[in-house]
Each structure stands twice: as C-alpha cells, then as structure tokens.
C-alpha cells in the first residue's frame, strides 16, 4: 500500500486554516482523491463544524479515560486504547475525522502519544491524503505526532504583519527539519490588491468570499457554500496543485 500524502495547514489564528482545510478536503474528495484522514490538531476543535460532522470525542478526552479507566473484561489495555481510538474517529462520506483535543495537565502529550502515534500510523495506511488543520503553533510537528508532511501550507492574510508571521512559521518548520521545497504560501482573503512579498512560492490566492461569512453567521457548514463561490473555486485549483505536488514526491 502506498503512503498517504500529508498536508499540514498552518498559520496564525484567524487566518482561515479551518475554512481552507474543510474546502480542501471537500475538493479532494470530489476529485476522487479518497479516502482522506482529516486531523483537527487545534485544541479548540472546530473542523468538524466546518465539515458538518458530529464529533463523539477527541483524543484528549479519550486519552485520559483510556489510560485511567478500568478495562472491560476480556480486553487488555492496548486493545482498549485501540477500541477507544476507533470510537474517536468520526466517519463521513469519503473521509474520517480525528480531533486531537487538549493535551492533559501540564500541556504534555508524552507517553500515551507513543501509542497514539502507532494508532495513527496503523490507520494512515488506507488513506490517500492526511489533511491536518494545524494549531497556531507547530506543537504536533515539534513533538512528532505529525511527521514529515509532504506539503506545508502557511496561510496568511495579504498584509505585512501576516507575512512576518509566515516567515517565523517557515523558520520554525525548517528548524524542525522540514525541507524548504515542501513549504508553500497561501494568501487568504485576497481582495485583488498585491500581496506583500514573501520568498515562499505562492501556491494559492483565496479571495474574500461573502458566502463564507454567511455560513459563519448562520453556523452552517463551510462545505455547504455554493460550488461556484469564488473561495471554493480557488481551493479547487489549490487541491489540483497539491495532488500534483504529492504525485511528484510519491
Ligand atoms: N476567504 C474568506 N472570505 C471570507 N471570510 C473568511 C475567509 N477565510 C476565512 N474567513 C473567516 O475568517 C474567520 C477565521 O477563519 P478560520 O478558518 O476559522 O481561521 P483559523 O482556522 O485560521 O483560525 C472566520 O470567521 C471565517 O469565516
Ligand atoms: Mg481553526
């Protein structure tokens, strides 16, 4: 079986990571690039809302219980953890969704993570793509929960301040060993004015799209916006670029 292509979507809070992640997952599925494992790595999990799926539990909540609770008769600890892990996996049409949730106590993912990483690796084998809606930091990459993505997207608004953050995330990613040719800039909420310069390749410009604001206000899934919505069309192009990028690395 071939390894899935992992795409991590990073960027400052509020830049549009979750919005783009949900539309990207949807576009890949529509293009037949399925199944997909969607990973919500933000402690404030909300990718499921953007996708319109229910979430039973996060790895954070599951982790605590699976390690402290009494194990049902006839199961060992590892079996129980794997069982709870499968329950944490929300299954939808074309993709599964896993939310990381919060690290317990001191902010440490530590020991249980070894087992969880193993669970994820076991899962991963079936997926064409793993799409990670990253937290604002790079915690999961730094800690090795998410290893060596094929593509790292850094999302920014077109402004100068956003671009400085892009530079910081890129430096951090490189210091964690990610090679520069896997890192791409996505300018979001583009209003047609020239974006600030960045030395990263610009893989997509996503326009400001009123349909996204409307979905937000109505608390309806982002993936429910019209097919011809400009942001959606731009993410469709982005998905095609990503498919090519992954094929080139495959
Ligand atoms: N292209 C866009 N057009 C209009 N609104 C957008 C666009 N992208 C994001 N938004 C809005 O910006 C806010 C932050 O987006 P979100 O995807 O939640 O960011 P993040 O996940 O990076 O914190 C949301 O209210 C969202 O609706
Ligand atoms: Mg988000």
Image: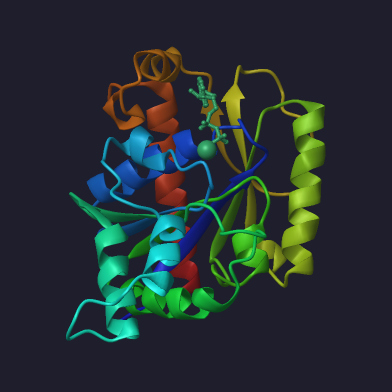
Name the quarter where the N terminus is drawn.
bottom left
Q: Residue at x 56, y 72 (%)?
A: 147
Single out the residue that lies furthest toward the front: 70
Residue at left 29%, top 59%? 89
Give the image's coloring scheme.
Answer: rainbow
Q: Quadrant of residue 129?
A: bottom left
Relative to 133, 218 lies left or right = left
Give the x, y percent position of residue 191: 61, 17
Between residue 233 and residue 85, name the one nearer to us: 85
* 189 to the left or right of 225: right
Q: How many marks?
A: 0
Q: Position of residue 190 (x, y in %)?
A: 60, 23
Q: Position of residue 57 (x, y in %)?
A: 34, 52
Task: Name the residue located 51 percent from the left edge and 80 percent from the top edge.
Answer: 114
Q: Is 59 on the left or on the right of 41, as rendered?
A: left
Front residue of 96 and 69: 69
Q: Is residue 180 visible?
A: yes
Rendered view: 201 above or below 218: below
Q: Quadrant of residue 49 in the image?
A: top left
Residue 244: x and y in percent read: 44, 59
* Identity of the residue drawn at 25% across and 72% down: 83
Of the pair 110 and 181, the residue shown nearer to us: 110
Q: Quadrant of the C terminus?
A: bottom left
Q: Is residue 127 visible?
A: no
Using the rendered view, name the quadrant where residue 136 is placed. top right
């Amino acid at each position: 079986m071939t390894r899935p292509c992992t795409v991590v979507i990073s960027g400052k809070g509020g830049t549009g990571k979750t919005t783009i992640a949900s539309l990207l997952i949807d576009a890949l599925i529509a293009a037949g690039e399925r199944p997909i494992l969607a990973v919500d790595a933000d402690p404030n999990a909300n990718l499921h809302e953007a996708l319109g799926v229910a979430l039973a539990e996060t790895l954070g909540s599951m982790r605590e219980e699976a390690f402290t609770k009494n194990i049902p008769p006839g199961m060992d600890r590892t079996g129980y953890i794997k069982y709870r892990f499968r329950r944490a996996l929300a299954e939808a049409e074309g993709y599964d969704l896993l939310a990381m949730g919060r690290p317990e106590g001191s902010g440490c993912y530590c020991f249980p993570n070894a087992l969880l990483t193993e669970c994820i690796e076991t899962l991963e084998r079936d997926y064409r793509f793993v799409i990670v809606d990253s937290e604002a930091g790079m915690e999961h990459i730094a800690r090795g929960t998410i290893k060596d993505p094929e593509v790292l997207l850094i999302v920014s608004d077109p402004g100068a301040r956003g671009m400085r953050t892009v530079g910081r995330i890129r430096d951090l990613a490189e210091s964690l060993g990610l090679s520069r040719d896997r890192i791409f800039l996505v300018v979001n909420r583009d209003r047609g004015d020239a974006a600030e310069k960045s030395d990263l390749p610009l893989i997509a410009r996503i326009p400001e799209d009123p349909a996204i604001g409307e979905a937000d206000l109505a608390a309806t899934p982002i993936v429910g916006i019209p097919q011809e919505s400009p942001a959606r069309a731009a993410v469709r192009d982005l998905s095609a670029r990503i498919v090519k990028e992954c094929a080139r690395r495959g």
